[in-house]
Image (tube, rainbow, N blue to C red):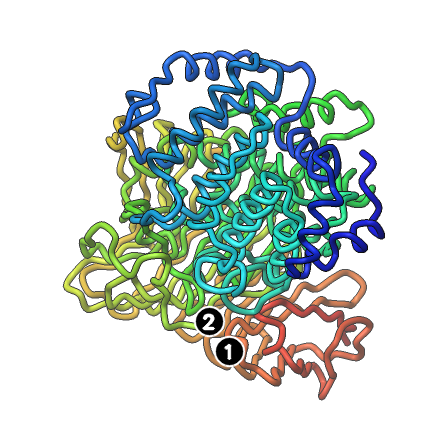
Amino acid sequence: MAWPSRRLFLRLGGVAAAGTAGALASARVAYTPDDMFVRLRRRWREVTVGSGAGPYGALGRAAARYRGTMAPEGSSLWPDQAFPSFVATPRRLRTMAQAYALGLGDAGLAAAVADGVEHYRRHVYAAGGAAPGNWWHWEIGVPRALLDASVLVGTRNAALAEAVGHYSPESRLHRYSGNSTAANRVDLCVVMLLRAMLDDDHRRAALAVSALSPVFATVSDGDGFYRDGSFIQHSYVPYQGAYGVTLLSGLATLYAVLRGSPWEIADRNVFETVERSYAPFVRDGACMDLVRGRSAGRRPFGDHERGREIAAAVLLLGESASADQRARWQAMVKGWAERGTYRPMLEHAEPAFHARLTAVMNDAAVPAAPEPVGHRLLPMSARAVHRRPGWCAALSMASHRIGHYEHGNGENLRGWHTGSGMLYWWAEGHGDQYSDSFWPTVDPYRLPGTTVSTRRLPDGAGAGWGDTRTPWRWVGGATDGTYAAVGQHLSGLESSLEAFKSWFFLDDLVVCLGAGITARDGSAVETIVDNRRTDARLTVGKGWAHLDGHGGYVVPDGQVLRTLRESRDGGGVRRDYVTLWLEHGLDPRAASYAYLLLPGAGLEETRAAGSRVVRVAANSARLQAVRVPSLGITAACFWNAGSVGGLTASAPCAVLVRERPGGTAEVTVADPRCDLDELVVTLARPVTGLPAGDALLTGSGALLFEGLAGQEGGSVTVTVRLG
């Protein structure tokens, strides 16, 4: 597409973009209806809807059905959708507009869309009216859908533009705060650009782009992207899988639509987030629930829907990326699509994404990338993902930064304990474990991995919108990219429960430790070893249990493993569960637990696991540590300064030591509390040199790490030569 030159734009419209009314008028005279905005609207249709043939029969039939049943009345546009119908009515109009843009309808369909938009505007969205209820409908949801539909069918509606200006004014983009941050800011900018396209307005087009600037900045608090890859919305909620999807999709669309235009977006920071912030939380095409906030239980298989939306955004953003990035992302998405068999991506894809994904799937030059292996720890959002061949685990924690859970708008009212150390895990064939009506049917007091008070809680317990944080700063851990030591100083939600929990992520198992478990609510406290949505056979032995087709559990030291098989109802469905838990009694004082989780392990492997050389070196409220001689690993969560197994730390921290053949070791440390100027880690063996890394050798085996507070909880690794 040939755009007018940037020089011409600057000469005729640049001052208008800066806000000068006279220059704006000149720009409007200079550009004819056949010029820049005609091309911009055409590009919008190509990017958001696509073109050409495809399996769009269902879309065409839906559009025809909506057209045939449209019956404008003062209180509705369709008899089954009484006004205000903020979601369904605008969505139906956009569906009809999509069908028209794809050539699935005649001019009468376009006229029906235009009439429907105008009818809705007059009766619901007229300029000057009040805006009761959820602000989002008035400022983002409704205007975006109505403007989008109008652009797709090529209608101009000055009254609609005026209404959008009333409900979603330019002033929303003047300050980066409140409901105008991160994903919401991107949505507001998309609305502003659509309004500019409807009205051939250069100044508003420029504003839509310039107002994006704060979104690209890396933040250290509040909403946005963090250095470690975290994405936060609503101040306290990790949200790559909902608001983050909206942000990525919106930016990908804007990059593609504006590429080559005078408003082309120059900032490239968002391109780094694909692999750093989003990909770690997508497994076989599904987005993990621990970064989906209150939307996790919105509908069955919502995790697959969000994964598909991330894939669509990644492929679209790839069109504006470097060749290397585009190649990696296409391979990654192809791998997701090939492995995502529970809700195949192509069967549920929107037309534009369907065309892009089909091209990638049919391109023999694009390999399907396998599931990666390794560990990703995002301390600023209290999330961790561990991948090994054949299985994957993910951990959700609450901290002084991150809430236990988010509820709002009547959603996720029983997500109380998802931040109490919930440990999700998948082995081969478990892609729907948390997808198929898990949230409406699972016992919300028995989420896998959590330590909780059984004290009954009301729906929506705690503050809304994610502000259910704990007072504790020690939440995070140390990882060398393969293994990890992760810890959580836990306070229960609206209870007196306090506990120290650690997880040590290894090759084929996770060591789970808890100590200092104390409460005084007059309620029992439990640690939930697992709660699987399955009717598989459970075999229980002395100190171990095995769940057929899932994996094994080892519970040493005479602990009593409780089990329950039950069917649970919720959301109009019934699902089977097998629950395993450890009881700590009524109002425990300094109780503890230890168990091994073996994802994908067979019966005999589980039975023999008790003799594995995985040694729990410490399990107290001061220190939790393991030693794995076969891997040369000593890993510890130091809640206080202390020593264990030849390893000493001068202050609270996480340490992972991995000895290598040839007389070297990698020492990885982290400061989850983000307050250490100096940390001394001392090894029992003498250290004769530091071949790699940023630390000082201050004595025989003593390593001085400086400036950890500035790492935002991130890990620092050095290589030492051992004497």
Q: Position of residue 272 (x, y in %)?
A: 70, 53
For mark 1, give the secondary structure.
loop
Disc 2 and disc 1 in contact, CB within 8 angstroms: yes
Q: Which of pointers 2 and 1 indicates the residue nearer the eye? A: 2
**Residue type for callout 1:** Pro
Residue linked to disc 1: 652
Pinpoint residue 357: horizontal percent, then vertical percent.
Answer: 67, 27
Quarter holding the N terminus is top right
Q: Is residue 624 above or below residue 457?
A: below
**Number of marks in picture:** 2
Q: Residues within 10 Å of mark 1 (few under 14, many from 20)?
A: many
**Furthest-bottom residue in view?**
698
Residue at position x 36%, y 48% in the image: 128
35 relative position to 432: left or right = right
Q: Going 44% across and 58% down the picture, which residue do you hit? A: 179
User: Mark 2 highlights which residue?
Assistant: 474
Identify which residue is drawn at 67% across, 58% down.
Answer: 22
29 versus 55 height, above or below: below
Residue 564 point in image, percent of width and height: 26, 38
Q: Quadrant of residue 289?
A: top left
